[in-house]
Amino acid sequence: MEGKTVLVSVLLATLAIAVVVAGFMAEATKAKRSQITVEYYGLEPIEPECHYPSSPAMGLAIAATVALVLARTIIQSTTGGCCSCCKPLHSMPKLGRVCIVISWILSSIAVVLFIAGAKLSTHNSAMVDVNGVYYCYTVKPGVFSGAGIMGLLSVLLGLVYYFLYVQAQRRAAEKSGADLELEKPPVTDVKKPPITDVKKPPVTDVKKPQAPSQNE
């Protein structure tokens, strides 16, 4: 159990770091408004098209999403599934249930932000503002970094829930073992009946009858 706990903890911590690093890197490398150009095609109607510079932001956002989903899968598989927080478990504190619920909410929001940011980073269609000017959409500041922070908190809360789950399982096993010990019938000290020294009957010296003599 200890080796498994250490392995799961290291994996989740690594994935949490990967999520937040990928989120901040995507935030730093996303396309800026000044780097996007609008080109117009055709005569009537004019069809503007946005051209974004090459950027690893989309790949980083997808990598962060994969890491977050993988962390969520590890937490589910090691704690009895997605409905484990609803199952009755001995000694499971309320803090664990709160942590897993918040973790689910944060991870869902982070995944949506990562996917939306990655999709909008390659949105080629130009839009028109109220003045009739064409412009290209850019991911708002803080979308990727915010998603990375929420993903980090989600995995950390899931790790806390995992620790509490393991401790609750251990306490439940100990209690079950104690209950089994109490249910066993008491072992009484049954004494064997004493072995009496039965004396053999005395051997009497029985004389053999004399054989008759031939003279008689």
Image (cartoon, rainbow, N blue to C red):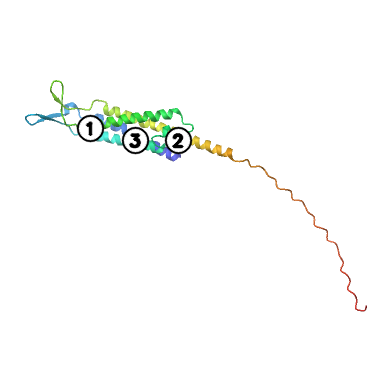
9 or 193, which is in the foreground? 193
Query: Residue 157: x, y in percent?
Result: 38, 30
Q: Which residue is mark 2?
A: 166
Task: Check whether the beta carbons of the residues at disc 2 and disc 3 lie within 8 A of each other.
Answer: no
CA distance separating discs 3 and 1: 23 Å
Does label 1 or label 2 sit earlier along the sequence?
A: 1
* Circle 3 SS class: helix
Q: Which residue is mark 1?
A: 119
Q: Nearer the viewer, mark 3 or mark 1?
A: 1
* Circle 1 SS class: helix
* Circle 2 SS class: helix
Does label 2 or label 3 sit earlier along the sequence?
A: 3
Task: Check whether the beta carbons of the residues at disc 1 and disc 2 lie within 8 A of each other.
Answer: no
Query: 10 Å neighbourhood of mark 2: few (<14), some, or many (≥20)?
Result: some
Q: Which residue is mark 3?
A: 15
Does label 3 or label 1 sit earlier along the sequence?
A: 3
**Among all residues in the image, which is located at the extreme left?**
43
Query: Residue 123: x, y in percent?
Result: 19, 31
Left/right placement of residue 175 relative to residue 133 reads right
Identify the residue shown where x is 53% and y is 35%.
175
Q: What amino acid does circle 3 point to?
A: Leu
Query: 10 Å neighbourhood of mark 3: few (<14), some, or many (≥20)?
Result: many
Query: Residue 127: x, y in percent?
Result: 16, 26
Left/right placement of residue 32 relative to residue 106 reads left
